[in-house]
Structure formats: structure tokens, C-alpha cells
Image: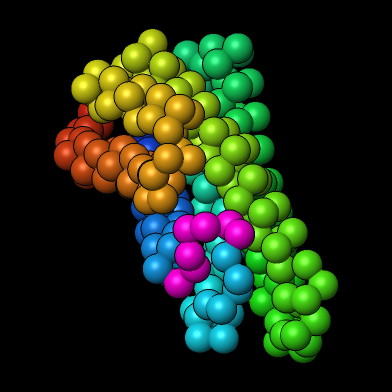
Amino acid sequence: MDQNAAITRSRLTTPRAAAIAGIVFSVLLLISLVLIRISVPSDPQDAGTWLAENSKTVGFALNLLPFAGIAFLWFIGVIRDRLGSSEDRLFATVFLGSGLLFLAMLFASAAVAGGIINLYGTAPGNLISSGLYTFGRSLIYEIMTVYAMKMAGVFMLTTSTLALRTGILPRWMAYLGLVLALILLLTVSLFYWTPLLFPLWVLLISLHILLANLRVPKKEPADGKSI
């Protein structure tokens, strides 16, 4: 009976952990992306005038990303645990690889942005005149737009495909993920706010997992005590 209770408790705790991790990741990334997008011009070739007024706001947004990354790693881990023996090796490899690549490039672009802000604080004139600002802004734009968000699209694509194959999510939610993934893969450079689709999608499925987990009824063992 103790073993059955432990298995039941594990089955209830795993999706709840995935939901909480997904919600934390989504909220932190949404706050960070929104703060950056309202503070930094969309043109990667801008003159850097925003640094004088908005560098502290952007710095705060960048400081949220490590915590978002930790939550995302936890989210990936518990989702894989949830799949268990149903995990397809091909899709699982792409799922894990795209998630880790997205996270690595997110951290890399945040590190470059943090370096630009630190350099501006010590030598603002040299940063602009030396061309380091233009190079850094262009590098961040390329990493985030061309690579990181496309990896996020691949992550959404494989997660939605796994959901269709295993039934861990409603079919409409899986199909929505496929559509949003194609938008990220094909049009992310056309619309400035498109990257918000990724954390919003993770937030949607995390809330669904959490609510579905809370609705799971408690099982009554043979002795009448609830597990």
C-alpha cells in the first residue's frame, strides 16, 4: 500500500510541478520581454539614445532571465517525466535539444546586452563612437530573432506533436501550438511583438495542466483512508 501511495502521489505531483514551473517561466519572460520592447527601439541600427533613460529598466529585465531559465529547465524535466514510457526518442531529442538551445541563446543575448549596459555606465561616449554598441545590438537581434525564437518555434512544434501522439494535452491546444510555432518560425522578424507568443503558449498549457491536476479526485484505498 505504501508503494501504491507513493506512485499515486508522484503522478499527482509531477504535472503540478510542470505547471508551476511553466507559469513562473512564462510570467518572468513576459515581464522581461515587455520591459525590453517598450524601452528599446525595434530598429537594431538605432543610435542608442534609449540608454540614457531606460538602461536601468532593461537591466532589471535582464536580471529576470536567469530565474526564467531555471524555471524553464524544470518545466522541460517534468514534462519529460510526465511522458515516461510514451516518450518517442526522435521527438524527445528534438524537444530537449531545441529547448536547451533556446535557453542558451537567450542567455547569450542577455549577456551581450548586459555588457553593453555596463560599458555605457563606465564610458558612454566610447561605447557609441567605437562601434561596439552597433555591433552588440546587431548581434543580439540576430541571436534572438534568427536563432533563439526559431528554436522556441521548434520546441513548440515538437511539444505539440508529442501531445497529439500521447494525449497529454487537448487536441485543440496541440493544434494551436502547431499554428503558433509556424508563426514563430516564419514571421518572427516581421512583427516586433511576435516573441511574446512563446511564453503565452507555455502559460496556457501550464494553466491547463495545473487546473486538470487540481480536478483529479483522491483515490480511496481498501482501508478507507484517503491517499
Residue 27, percent across and down?
Answer: 38, 59
Residue 45, percent across and down?
Answer: 61, 59
* Residue 214 falls in image quadrant: top left
209 sits left or right of 30 in the view:
left
Q: Judge whether residue 206 can be spotted in this image.
A: no
The number of discs equals 0
Q: Residue at x 52, y 57 (%)?
A: 43
Residue 50, percent across and down?
Answer: 53, 77
223 sits left or right of 110 in the view:
left
In the foreground, 57 or 103: 57
In the foreground, 60 or 95: 60
Q: Judge whether residue 33 can be spotted in this image.
A: yes
Q: Which quadrant of the figure contains the C terminus?
A: top left
Picture layout, residue 72 above or below residue 178: below
Majority secondary structure of magenta residues: loop
147 sits left or right of 155 in the view:
right
In the foreground, 102 or 39: 39
* Residue 29 falls in image quadrant: bottom left
- Residue 196 magenta-highlighted: no
64 sits left or right of 34 in the view:
right
Colour mode of the rendering: rainbow
Q: Which residues are magenta?
A: 39-45
In the foreground, 85 or 209: 209
* Residue 107 falls in image quadrant: bottom right
Q: Residue at x 50, y 86 (%)?
A: 53
Picture layout, residue 196 above or below residue 1: below
Q: Residue at x 57, y 65 (%)?
A: 46
Q: Which quadrant of the figure contains the N terminus?
A: top left
Residue 13, percent across and down?
Answer: 39, 43
